[in-house]
Amino acid sequence: MTEKSANHNANYLRYVNAFDPPTKHFTTCLRAFAVGGFICTIGQFFRYMLEFAGLTGDMLAGTVSAILIFLGTLLTGLGVYDRIGKNAGAGSIVPITGFANSVASPAIEFKTEGYVYGMAAKMFIVAGPIIVFGVSAGAAVGLIYWLIGL
């Protein structure tokens, strides 16, 4: 890169940064922590209610997960989860509801392209790599565990 283009890039970055509001790191982290904690508290509330109803073990865990996935997808479809994410940042994408949002959002966005080539094909654009690496990591850990157990 020449000196002229480097100087031009530096000038451009100064120009862009003049319009960019400063990041309030402490407030952003606090808000993410509060919203993520609130989502997890809702999940814990459902867990206690279902335990009180008599569910235990894997059935309890699966039901709570299904409820949270449903709520995340429903709020995404209603446009509420995007507003939560805009204000909460990482606090809204870390829990299981964020994963549901990452699957539902592309499906809604590409619905106009049809059910097969739009919704079905684009549904896992964001979540696909997470699923692939999650399954791969789980298989690798399982294989290591199996080898150690021999």
Image (tube, helix red, strand yellow):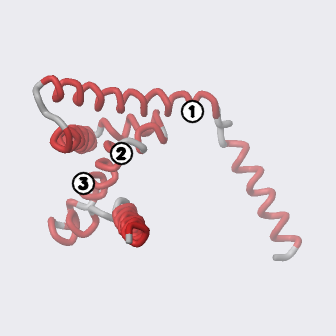
Which residue in the rendered view is the most extreme toward the front?
A: 150
Q: Residue shown at 24%/54% (left/top)?
A: 108
Q: Which residue is mark 3?
A: 108
In the rendered structure, which amino acid carries the disc numbered 3? Ile
Say which of 82 and 28 sits in front: 28
Task: Kindly tell me whether residue 49 is visible in this rendering.
Answer: yes
Q: Residue shown at 41%/44% (left/top)?
A: 93
* Quarter in which the C terminus is drawn: bottom left
User: Mark 3 or mark 2, which is nearer to you?
Assistant: 2
Q: Which of marks 3 and 1 precedes in the sequence?
A: 1
Q: Secondary structure at mark 1?
A: helix
Q: Residue shown at 46%/27% (left/top)?
A: 34
Picture quadrant where residue 13 is located? bottom right
Which residue in the rendered view is the most extreme toward the left?
A: 53
Residue 22 lies, with reference to residue 128, above or below; the image says above
Picture quadrant where residue 26 is located? top right
Q: Which residue is mark 1?
A: 28
Task: Kindly tell me whether residue 129 is visible in this rendering.
Answer: no
Q: Mark 2 and mark 3 in contact (Cβ < 8 Å)?
A: no
Q: Which of marks 1 and 2 precedes in the sequence?
A: 1
In the rendered structure, which amino acid carries the disc numbered 1? Thr
* Quarter in which the N terminus is drawn: bottom right
Q: Secondary structure at mark 2?
A: helix
Q: Which of marks 2 and 3 precedes in the sequence?
A: 2
| Marking on residue 98 | 2
